[in-house]
Amino acid sequence: MKLLSTIALLCILLSCQPEGRVYIEYQALSPQIEWLQKDSRVFEVPIEDNSKPFKMSMSFRYATGYQFQVAKVIVSELSPSGVEAVYNYQFKVIEDNGQYIGQPGLDIWDSEHVVEASKKFDEVGVYTYKVEHAMPVDPLNYAMEVGIILDEIKP
């Protein structure tokens, strides 16, 4: 019976994934609803096929009260062979009129931001991403979670 329940749960979870989704991981920040600059988050993204492009997005979960119109992050990418690249991304999370951007859930907002519409990987293997905030304050209040999403681009 336990095995049947586990299989049913796995089927439900897999059916919720969009077609072509290769990787998705979210990591919580501080229980105090803040993000310290020294608290980077590390993601290990396995790439099994580098012959096609991917859409790379980042997610940002924040609470009502977030004080900036954008969230700025620094992302360090380390390839399987040790080649490092650093990217600066900026996500708009509040419209000019003050409206929060994203899917609401009471006072929590989930936003997804495409950072590379057609990402090509040079190698097969595990890419390591280190994500840290690059905002002018520390800690960054009302920040709750950050994530990386990788979708296969269908021809």
Image (cartoon, rainbow, N blue to C red):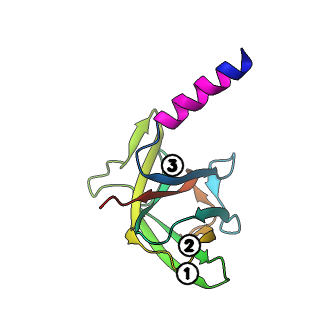
Q: In this view, does 58 lie above or below 32?
A: below
Image quadrant in which you'd find residue 46: bottom right
Q: Which disc number belongs to residue 62?
A: 3
- Answer whether residue 9 is magenta in the image: yes
Q: What residue type is labelled 1?
A: Val
| Dot 1 crowding, Cα within 10 Å, few <14, some 14–19, many 20+ | few
Q: Which disc number belongs to residue 40?
A: none
Contact flag, marks 3 and 2 (Cβ < 8 Å):
no
What is the quadrant of the C terminus in the image?
A: bottom left
Q: In this view, does 3 lie above or below 119?
A: above
Mark nearest the camera among 3 and 1 is 1
Q: Which of marks 3 and 2 is nearer the N terminus?
A: 3
Q: Which disc number belongs to residue 75?
A: 2
Which residue shows up at 40% across the image and 46% down it?
A: 19
Which residue shows up at 32% across the image and 51% down it?
A: 98
Image quadrant in which you'd find residue 127: bottom right
Q: In this view, does 108 lie above or below 86?
A: above
Q: Give the range drawn in magenta.
A: 5-15
Which residue shows up at 69% across the image and 45% down it?
A: 31
Q: What residue type is labelled 2?
A: Val
- Which residue is under mark 1? 86
Contact flag, marks 2 and 1 (Cβ < 8 Å):
yes
109 vs 136, nearest the viewer? 109
Q: Earlier in the sequence, mark 2 or mark 1?
A: 2
Q: Does residue 13 appear left or right of residue 51 in this picture?
A: right
